[in-house]
Image (spheres, rainbow, N blue to C red):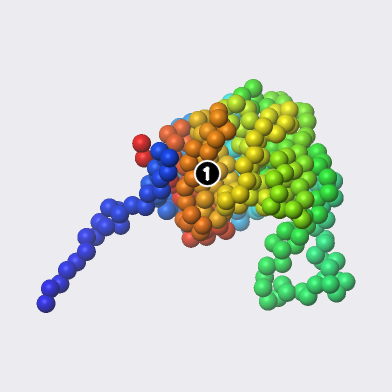
Amino acid sequence: MKILHCAKERDYIQKTVYSDGGFAYEYESDFAKGLPAALGRCSVAGGCTDPEGNVYLAMRDPGQIVKLTPSGQFVKAFGGEILDSYIHFIYYHQGHKTIICTNTHGHEVLEFDLDGNLFRRFGEHGRPSDTGMDMGTLARMRRDGKLFPTEPYLGVVPMWAFYVAQQGVKRVAGPFNMPTDAGVTRDGRYVFADGYGNRAVHIFNKDGGYEKTFGGVGDWSKPYEDTPGQMLLVHALCVDQLDHIWICDREKDAVHVFDTRGNVVGYCSGSMGSPSGVDTDGRYVYVVGRAGYLTVFDPETMEIAAQLGTFNSDLRAHDIAADREGNLFLFPTHANEDHQVIKLRRIK
């Protein structure tokens, strides 16, 4: 009888690599390490990096911001005394050395210093702008006998109600109605995606004063037609090195690119896997889809530089962050609940 034992190191030797067009990444499924037990059970909605390579997480239930070292070790958590449980995305403001957080259900955007002190508040907590969205649509349908109340059996009605209400946005309005993401231009102006209850992009000056709003309400009855600037869901935002504003329109399966005046300068749709998160490393723009697709754009040429992943691959995520070394961090949330943070280490 021959008895064999496979190498114990095989899990470390055999590494998943995603590559296309000169872009190659080594996959690390669980980057966050040393989290306190309570945080290890939390959902990570999104994240960002700082110039030193530290990674910051937007955690839900309870809402808080968590700092990790470049190697993924837990450092601290802050913001939980102020943030709602349903925060969305965060952004590192290099000029201020602060973290900007969209407090989505509070209809506000909060900026914290790295000690967790509130630096600046945008919007008024609990006061949404008037876009015509009505969160009570589903409740009235049940009350009027038009819809059987399935919540005791399926437990999905809150998200279903949210989805139905989003389709009722009638007009672009000012700040804020469920904001989703943030960025900063080269001259320090704030740019916000306003997002779940609006179809808008808002720009504030560097001192926090409101400047302008632009956007457009897409037609839910025509999801497959190209409609640059007319959006179904303003889910994520990124400002690139040219001050172009990249918007992930998740339900449209499209990306809209605006200049700071509100003009559409680029558009890409189809086979993007429901683009959910977007970030830049200062050279390329990276878009991740909930279905497992990663698309890399060259903002200088507005061309696709690489397409990685396949339908339902392990690249599916809710948000993405890039560091200065070209490494990527995926924040799966409900797109892949087996993991909190995935690192894609760039292979040179």
From the viewer's side, name the closer residue of 158 and 238: 238
Name the residue rendered at 52%, 44% in the picture.
Answer: 295
Q: Is residue 196 visible?
A: no
Q: Quadrant of residue 2?
A: bottom left
How many neighbours does mark 1 have within 10 angstroms: few (below 14), some (14-19), or many (20 or more)?
Answer: many
On the image, numbered disc 1 is attached to which residue?
Answer: 295
Q: Position of residue 204 (x, y in %)?
A: 73, 30
Q: Position of residue 189 (x, y in %)?
A: 68, 27
For the C terminus, the image quarter is top left
Q: What element does badge 1 sit on?
A: strand
Q: Position of residue 63 (x, y in %)?
A: 62, 51
Query: Could you tell whether 72 is left or right of 262 in the image?
Result: left
**Hey, what amino acid is under mark 1?**
Thr
- Residue lying at the far right in this picture: please name it: 144
Query: Could you tell whether 280 is left or right of 10 in the image?
Result: right
Q: Is residue 314 visible?
A: yes
Name the residue rendered at 70%, 34% in the picture.
Answer: 264
From the viewer's side, name the closer residue of 272 and 182: 272
